[in-house]
Structures are given as C-alpha cells and as structure tokens.
Amino acid sequence: MLSGAMIPRAGRSDMPEQVADAGQPVEVCRQRIGIMPGRTGTLPWEQALELATQVVQARADRATVPGDCRATRLVVAVSI
C-alpha cells in the first residue's frame, strides 16, 4: 500500500499508454529469465503441453501393445 499517496484515476485517453508502460517491466523480466511468448502462452508452457501430449500418446500406445501381441500370437498359431 502506498503511504498516503493518492493514485489519480486515468482518463480513457491515456489508458493504452499506461497499459503499455505497465507491460514493459514484464517483458524485460521475461527476456531476462528466458521466457519467450508463443502462440498460446509462453514457450515453456507450450513445451509442457507438448510433453503432456506425448505422454498421453505413449500411454495409449503402451495400452495397445498387449492386444497387438495377442493378435500376433493368434495369427502365428493359426498359420502353423
């Protein structure tokens, strides 16, 4: 909390400037720690989402392996 200082309300005309000014330190911080904006969020966030997608795909693939093995054994047994 500010010590008794009053923050004047911004008029509509200077609101975009205030938003841009407020965003500048955020951009500086992102650049400093290596977070780059991406299409749907920050680059690390997008990488985490991609990794999660790959984990789900790997689990789905792993779930189908026993069935594939049974089908292969059945084909081999029938053809012998």
Image (cartoon, rainbow, N blue to C red):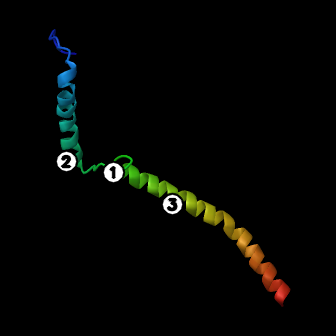
Q: Residue 54, position in %: x, y?
A: 51, 60
**Circle 2 or circle 1, nearest the eye:** 1
Question: Where 29 sits versus 15, above or below?
Answer: below
Q: Residue at x 18, y 37 (%)?
A: 25
The residue type indicated by label 2 comes to Arg
Side of 68 relative to 51 (left or right): right
Q: Secondary structure at mark 3?
A: helix
How many neighbours does mark 2 have within 10 angstroms: few (below 14), some (14-19), or many (20 or more)? Answer: few
Q: Residue at x 22, y 16 (%)?
A: 1
Side of 11 relative to 36 (left or right): left
The residue that mark 1 highlights is: 38
Q: Residue at x 34, y 52 (%)?
A: 43
Question: Where 47 sits versus 3, above or below?
Answer: below
The residue that mark 2 highlights is: 32
Q: Residue 15, position in %: x, y?
A: 21, 25
**Contact? badges 3 and 1 (CB < 8 Å):** no
Gap in angstroms between the C-alphas marked 2 and 3: 29 Å
The residue type indicated by label 3 comes to Gln
The quarter of the picture where residue 67 lies is bottom right
| 2 or 1: tag closer to the N-terminus | 2
Gap in angstroms between the C-alphas marked 3 and 1: 19 Å
Gap in angstroms between the C-alphas marked 2 and 1: 16 Å
The quarter of the picture where residue 77 lies is bottom right
Side of 44 relative to 19 (left or right): right
Q: Residue at x 40, y 55 (%)?
A: 47
| 2 or 3: tag closer to the N-terminus | 2
Q: Residue 17, position in %: x, y?
A: 17, 30
The residue that mark 3 highlights is: 54
Where's the C terminus, which quadrant? bottom right
The residue type indicated by label 1 comes to Gly
**Circle 3 or circle 1, nearest the eye:** 1
